[in-house]
Every structure is written in structure tokens, then in C-alpha cells.
Amino acid sequence: MVMEIPAGVRALMWEFSIDDQSIDESFERAVVERTMERGGWNEMKWLLRRFDGPHLRSFLEERGRKVLPPRELRFWSHICGIPGSTQDEWVSDARLRSAAWRG
């Protein structure tokens, strides 16, 4: 699969050799996760153009809700049409995860 990855997204994927990376499902998930978590406006716009809403929503439901920080999780959940009550639950869980790291 060919995925044109812009320079801003490449910078987020610093530990990967993207030129040699075969674009499989696990690498695609890593690109989505890293862009949702750390991407700037241009990278987020690219993500929205590259992947459709159902794909991004599926990522949030399966993995994103477990790993994204609260602010990014709220933003992407809203963009992907996740119901407000579900957003609240996911963000609450994310805040608890964040608090556990602060000790």
C-alpha cells in the first residue's frame, strides 16, 4: 500500500525508517495515533483528508480511547461524532491514566 506521508507527519514518526517501511495495518495505526496525539494543524488536516471518519472513529473506539491524552481524545472524539456521554467517560478514564503517572 502506498501512503504519501507529508514532512510534518514524518517528523512525528522519528523512530521509523519510513522510506523502507512497508505500510501495513500496524504502521498505519501508529501514524494515526501519533498524528492525533502530537500533530499540529497541518498534520491533523492531512489525517482528516487521508482517512475517512469511520476509519478514525474505529481507531478511537479500539485503541485511541486507551492511549490518547484527555485534550486530544476530546477533540478527536468530537470530530468523529462520538456521543457526548461516551466522550465524557473516555476523557474521565484518560484523566485517571494521566494522574497515575503524576503519582
Image (tube, rainbow, N blue to C red):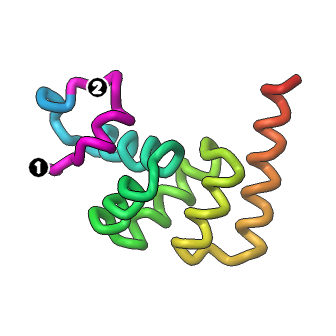
Asked if the residue at tag 2 contacts the one at tag 1, i.e. Cβ–Cβ closer than 8 Å, the answer is: no
Q: Position of residue 35 (x, y in %)?
A: 43, 47
Q: Main secondary structure of the magenta part?
A: loop
Q: What are the residue bounds of the magenta stretch?
A: 2-17
Q: Which mark is residue 32?
A: none
Q: Residues within 10 Å of mark 2 (few under 14, many from 20)?
A: few
- Name the element at disc 2: loop
Extreme residue toward the right, this view: 103
Residue shown at 61%/46% (left/top)?
A: 68
- Name the element at disc 1: loop
Name the quadrant containing residue 34. top left
Name the quadrant containing residue 60. bottom right
Residue shown at 11%/49% (left/top)?
A: 2
In the rendered structure, does residue 9 fall within the stretch colored magenta?
yes
Viewport quadrant of the C terminus = top right
Q: Position of residue 90 (x, y in %)?
A: 73, 57
The CA span between labels 1 and 2 is 16 Å
- Residue at the spot of label 1: 2
Q: Position of residue 53 (x, y in %)?
A: 41, 72
Q: Position of residue 71 (x, y in %)?
A: 68, 54
Relative horizontal placement of residue 20, taking residue 81 as reference (left or right):
left
- Residue at the spot of label 2: 16
Compared with residue 16, is residue 59 higher up or lower down, i.e. above or below?
below
- Tag 1: amino acid: Val
Residue shown at 83%/30% (left/top)?
A: 100
Relative horizontal placement of residue 22, taking residue 11 as reference (left or right):
left
Residue shown at 56%/59% (left/top)?
A: 61
In the rendered structure, does residue 99 fall within the stretch colored magenta?
no
